[in-house]
Amino acid sequence: MEVKRVIAICQSGGEFLTEKDGTLSYRGINAHAIDIDDQMKFDEFKLEVTEMFGCNNNMVFKYFLPGNKKTLITVSNDKDLHRMIKFHGDFATIDVYIMEEVAPPDVSNMPASR
């Protein structure tokens, strides 16, 4: 079976803006490209991106499906990574957006409503 390879254009430090038609566009600061394939493990991908951007381990990876700029898809394990590559089978590149994971608010000190 042939190994599927693509270039992941990893972008960070930016923000998403909603256009008038509801699509999202990204205005990024940093971008790096890495080769990925359908044999790569998620932990390998995460480690490479972490080293490339010099950031901590608390990051989230997102991408758009081809033809859909309204819904971001999360990559969080091997299966997600392989699906991302498969879904972009006819493309040479995939835009991957790296964001810091935001911790949920601490609700333990909030008053309970009745």
Image (cartoon, rainbow, N blue to C red):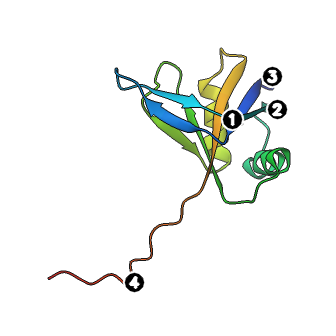
Residue position for label 3: 2
Indicate the secondary structure of the residue bearing disc 2. strand
Indicate the secondary structure of the residue bearing disc 4. loop
Q: Is residue 109 left or right of residue 31?
A: left
Tell which circle, 4 or 2, labels the residue nearer the N-terminal end. Answer: 2
Picture quadrant of residue 71: top left
Residue 101 horizontal/vertical position (percent)? 59, 57
The extreme left residue here reads 114
Tell us which disc is closer to us: 2 or 1: 1
**Which amino acid type is shown beneath numbered disc 3?**
Glu
The answer to whether 75 is drawn above or below residue 95 in the figure is below
Residue position for label 1: 29
Residue 107 horizontal/vertical position (percent)? 38, 77
Q: Residue at x 19, y 80 (%)?
A: 113
Q: Residue at x 76, y 52 (%)?
A: 43
Residue 73 horizontal/vertical position (percent)? 52, 39
The answer to whether 11 is drawn above or below residue 60 in the figure is above
Q: CA distance from mark 4 to mark 2?
A: 42 Å
Indicate the secondary structure of the residue bearing disc 3. loop
Rendered image: mark on residue 34: 2
